[in-house]
Amino acid sequence: MNSMKALPVIFMLFFSLVTLSSGDLIEDVCRTSSDFKVCIDALRADPKSSSADKKGLVHILLQQCLTKAKSIYNEIVSLLEQAKEHVLIQCLQVCKENYDSSIDDAETAIKDFDANDFPGTMSAVSGVVSAPDTCEETFNESVKISPIKSKDDDFMNFINLTASLINQFEN
């Protein structure tokens, strides 16, 4: 009879331990990234993240890198259509070419990551990060203010946080 009374207590203890040990994977992963808040916001915005494992979360971030690269590329194309000043057109053309390559690199990074080729993923991600970097350097050299500077900076930060998580798979 005493063992029957102890059963609910044991069950409650076990349930409490399971609940405490099953923390929030998104928070755990983002704590190890280079930008906790941006990481949390990006992953919480994607409904697939709630059921993803760590690799799935990084895959989601890589997909978001690709989406961001395409969005910035489209904005550059739009700015080019409106541009009249020769120097601005030249700078935007360099940005367009680099973001075009960045889209290819982001697609390669996703493919390599899914195939567990983490060095290949990092190589492709370094190609992705070159787009905003080169774009901003082009504007700085021309002494022209970049119309997409804040987007380039945000994108570079996003790529770097994604890379910080990919690096954890190489070890």
Image: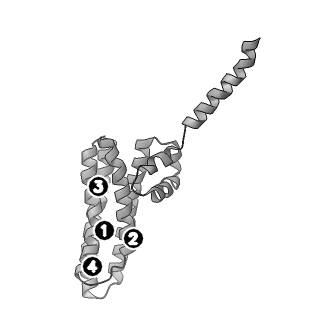
Q: Disc 2 designates what residue? A: 151
Considering only order in the chain, which callout, 2 or 4, is on the residue closer to the N terminus? 4
In the structure shown, which secondary structural element does the residue marked by tag 1 occupy?
helix
Mark 4 vs 2: CB contact within 8 A: no
Could you say where residue 144 lies in the image, as x and y percent from the top left? Answer: 29, 84
Amino acid type, mark 4: Phe
Cα separation, mark 2 vs mark 1, equals: 8 Å
Q: Nearer the viewer, residue 170 or 108?
A: 170
Amino acid type, mark 3: Val
Q: Disc 1 designates what residue? A: 132
Considering only order in the chain, which callout, 1 or 3, is on the residue closer to the N terminus? 3
x 43%, y 50%: residue: 60
Q: Which mark is residue 139?
A: 4
In the structure shown, which secondary structural element does the residue marked by tag 4 occupy?
helix
Considering only order in the chain, which callout, 1 or 2, is on the residue closer to the N terminus? 1
Name the side, left or right, on which 133 lies relative to 12: left
